[in-house]
Image (spheres, rainbow, N blue to C red):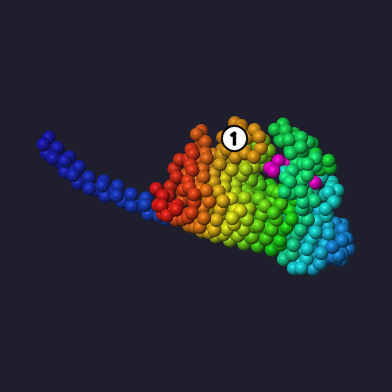
Amino acid sequence: MYKHHTTRIFKKAFLLPLLLFASISCDVQSAKKADAQPDIWAKAEQIIENVKTPVFKDTLFNVTKFGAIADGITKNTEAFNKAITACSASGGGTVLVPEGVYVTGPIHLQSNVNLYISKGAEVLFSKDTLDYLPMVHTSYEGVELMNYSPLIYAKGAKNIGVTGEGTLNGQADTTNWWPWCGANRYGHLEGMPDQKDEHNLPTLRIMNEDNTPISERKFGPGHQLRPLFFETLECENVIVKGVTFTNAPFWVIHPLKSNNIIVDGVTVNSHGPNNDGCDPEYCKNVVIQNCIFNTGDDCIAIKSGRNNDGRRVNIPSENIVVQNCTMKDGHGGVVIGSEISAGVRNVFVRKCTMDSPELERAIRIKTNTLRGGFVENVYVKDLTVGQVKEAVLKVNTYYGIYANQSGEYIPTIKNINLENVTVKNGGKYGLLIKGREQAPVTNITLKNVTIDNAENASSIENADSITYINTYINKTLMK
């Protein structure tokens, strides 16, 4: 027995270092494995690679050959649409708008058509609201309806483009479209109808709550809901490149239920009400790059439907890359929400510049318990901010500019990452986060972030797992 007992002791003494070595070895291998994990930004590169640039046939259709006259007076709606129809029917190509000033009603794109606005060309969209009839299937603030046609519109098309170096001028101003928003500074006068009247937005809100069929949500004549500038509905493979948009009635670039979208080198210079620059909604695989946004509302706002409409459609917006853009002015640089009921995931923002005394927030997420929805996996890198008014990062789950914004749909927000961000003037707050006790905002990481001249470092309610790595706010290392 003594011999066996001694043998057992020897075996234990011999095995203990081996077990310890094996444990250390496993820890080292785990560390190496963690270090070897692929860079999350490889996902952004994969998205860019997957979004293929549309290719068009080398066939030209000059609008002047279809009767268009560049005198700034003649209405060329029929000529533009004849050229587009002929182009699509022949298998596609480029519809050329040469130098000059052209007036037109709405332009409806068709598959395999690239509308090219030449340098020195300006397209003026008619101020006659009747030109935007018949009504089409469109949307307003995240709710689908039948309304005035967007100025440029496509439904169910594949392989389409709006490109060139010219200007698309919506001609909205304090006498056209804008007064319908109801604000005096945009031309609304006492007694004039506006979008808040009972037969407008309040009626549309009820239709949304009641799940009224879209075909029965008829607005247009007798109503005051402004049309979008450029909307693609249920489209595939869209490119918008090089052109300038100005004087928009409402949101400027609005891909809706569309996939594989490129917005490249576009200038949005439009300071009207709700003049968001680019609002992908229910969209997948979107690249927004090399653009200048000088807007009256959010520069980029990623959306996914409002309340019941968002839950009915149930298409999250995902796989969106924003890079090399300049946000000169607007309510927010890159915003997610507030129409967000179907959720947003996988958003990558890098190498952007924001600098304006009127820019209120650099990165913003906004929702409430009527909208609900989720936001996850947002990555921001290499961002240079001159100044913001309110906050560098704002997350608000109590957003509301309308009445009765409380419901039963608790939003979830997680995995928000800022890296290599420098801010000269941080506004009121470096971080402004307002989560909910039932569902706190989770997993926020700031790495190599420097925010100077903020009135307050942060205001944080109901947020868990905030990680600071080499992050300074007002010269103080955050821990």
Residue name at image x 67 percent, y 52 percent: 296
Q: Position of residue 329 (x, y in %)?
A: 63, 56
Q: Choose between 470 and 380: the one closer to the eye.
A: 470
Decide: is 206 above or below 332: above
For label 1, the crowd category at 10 Å Cα-Cα, with few meaning under 14, some 14 to 19 and many 20 or more, is: some
Quarter the N terminus occupies: top left
Residue 71 in the image, given as x and y percentages of width and height: 86, 65
Residue 93: name its quadrant: bottom right
Q: Is residue 100 above or below residue 432?
A: below
Residue 144 belongs to magenta span = yes
The three-letter amino acid code for the residue at tag 1 is Thr
Residue holding disc 1? 369
Instruction: Give the residue at x 37% y 54%.
Output: 32
Q: Which residues are magenta?
A: 141-148
Q: Residue furthest left?
A: 2
Main secondary-structure element of the magenta-colored stretch: strand
Q: Indicate the position of residue 452 as horizontal and vertical percent values.
A: 47, 55
Q: Is residue 99 magenta?
A: no
| Residue 65 visible | yes
Check disc 1 and report its element: helix, strand or loop: loop
Does the image show residue 110? no
* Residue depicted at x 57% and y 47%: 364
